[in-house]
Image (cartoon, rainbow, N blue to C red):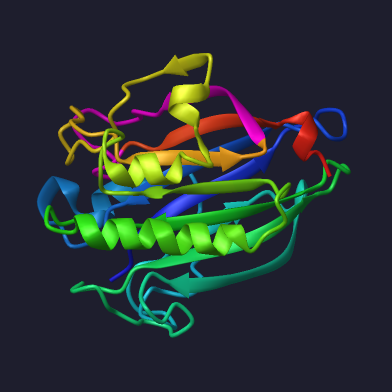
Amino acid sequence: MFACALAVGVSVTASAGTTPLRVMTFNVRVPVDQGANAWENRRGLMVQVIRARQGREGGSKGEHMGVFYRTDRLEVLRFGDFWLSDTPDVPGSITWGQPYPRMVTWARFRLRDGGGTFDYLNTHFPYRDQDVRPRMLSAAEILRWIDQLPADARVILTGDFNCAPDTPVHAKLTAGLHDAWIEAATRSGPARTFHNFTGTPDRRIDWILSRGFKARTVSTVTTHEGARYPSDHFPVVAELVATPAAVQ
């Protein structure tokens, strides 16, 4: 089986140092459903061709935190993974009472037009109602990773955080990162993102967070064919512009 939490970074032509980035976060449902929501009936609706890296169990197993980008606009300087556990460097590691491993895929990108660099992280947090503590510990682990970067480094964090914006997890992460949905002057589409293949979302759990950028626009994409949706989550797309203090 193959499941992804997707993030797509695409740069858009602009003057050096102010290059906007168009960023998408998209949780693509694992192919276990039957009938109308079977993968064979959904894959044609995917908005991007996906290429897997390392799965959360290590190697090719489990879900993937794929990060996809425009190679003509962005260059990868380095990349890697870490796991949301007490042993983040151990592939597939599970602690905090979790039934499944959780992970982060990250990459440092350079804008080919001279707009500098940024670090991109993509993740998928624990989903159960009782997982408040593991989600908080996951947020803390990600912030520890970010804290190792230079203070002026630009950062984008995307993913399915499996909790609402009025939770301690969101408060912890947004103490140092900006939520594009809150920050952007222009918003379109529903605020909520998880719809369970109904088209009627009930929770905003998919976020685009950043440091050193300002969100210009943000939208929730509701593309579908009749009653068929590509996933049980709507993707979220934001246009981010580097703030002057963070231009490298």
Q: In the image, is residue 127 part of the stretch drawn in magenta?
A: no
Q: In the image, is residue 219 part of the stretch drawn in magenta?
A: yes
> Quick one: 215 or 75, which is closer to the camera?
215
Where residue 213 appears, as percent x and y from the top left, is 65, 34
* Main SS of residues in magenta: loop
Residue numbers of the magenta segment? 213-233
Left or right of residue 198, residue 189 in this image: right
Left or right of residue 93, residue 199 in this image: left
Left or right of residue 19, residue 15 in this image: right
> Quick one: 116 or 231, which is closer to the camera?
116
Q: Is residue 109 visible?
A: yes
- For the point 49% across and 81% down, which residue is it? 89
Q: Is residue 46 visible?
A: no
Where residue 235 appears, as percent x and y from the top left, is 39, 38
Where residue 92 appears, as percent x and y from the top left, is 36, 81
Quarter of the rendering occupied by the N terminus: bottom left
> Quick one: 197 or 127, which is closer to the camera?
127
Left or right of residue 150, residue 170 in this image: left
- In the image, is residue 173 above or below residue 221? below
- For the point 52% across and 63% down, which residue is it? 144
- Residue 79 quadrant: bottom right
